[in-house]
Amino acid sequence: MPLLLGAWWAAWIVSNYVANAALRTGWSTDTPEEARTAAQVDIAASAIDFAAGVLVIPVILRLTARQQARAEKLAATPPPAPPAPPDTIPAA
């Protein structure tokens, strides 16, 4: 899972940087060509974001399975015995 988690994290970070670049490029467009470039960068950001979304699905499923297994293991373990009552303190 660490490799898959790292791949998802990298795709998510790259997607955010590319989306930021698309937004900044879109703000400073003066010609149709610049607007087209901004749109292409935004499409690339969306594609990377989609890939990150696909990568996160198995991460979530595996993490959920691990949490459920841990919860079942803890539920099967009997609770510890309560502590012994404290000794009585003689009155002064």
Image: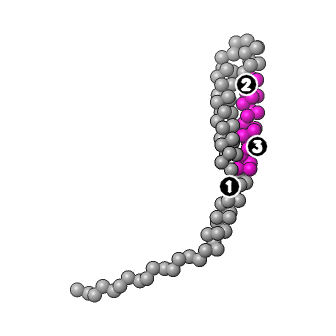
Q: Main secondary structure of the magenta part?
A: helix
Circle 1 sits in a helix, a strand or a loop, which is it? Answer: helix
User: Would you place residue 51 above or below residue 35 in this image?
Assistant: below
Tag of residue 54: 3
Q: Find out whether residue 51 is within the magenta segment.
A: yes
Q: Looking at the picture, tell me which residue is in the foreground, 75 or 27.
A: 75
- Residue 72: image quadrant is bottom right
Residue drawn at 71 percent across, 55 percent down:
62
Residue stretch in magenta? 39-59
Query: What amino acid type should be assigned to the residue bearing mark 2?
Result: Val
| Residues marked 3 and 2 touching at CB (< 8 Å) | no
User: Would you place residue 26 above or below residue 79 in this image?
Assistant: above
Q: Which quadrant is the C terminus positioned in?
A: bottom left
- Mark 3 surroundings within 10 Å by alpha-carbon count, few (fewer than 14), some (14 through 19), many (20 or more): few
Label 3 or label 2, whichever comes before in sequence order = 2
Spatial CA span between label 3 and label 1: 15 Å
Q: In this view, does 8 lie to the left or right of 78?
A: right
x and y, in percent, of residue 91 in the image? 26, 87
Query: What amino acid type should be assigned to the residue bearing mark 3?
Result: Val
Q: Residue furthest front?
A: 3
Circle 3 sits in a helix, a strand or a loop, which is it? Answer: helix
Label 3 or label 1, whichever comes before in sequence order = 3
- Mark 2 surroundings within 10 Å by alpha-carbon count, few (fewer than 14), some (14 through 19), many (20 or more): many
Spatial CA span between label 3 and label 2: 20 Å
Tag of residue 41: 2
Residue position for label 1: 63
Residue drawn at 68 percent across, 33 percent down:
15
Q: Looking at the picture, tell me which residue is in the foreground, 20 or 75.
A: 75
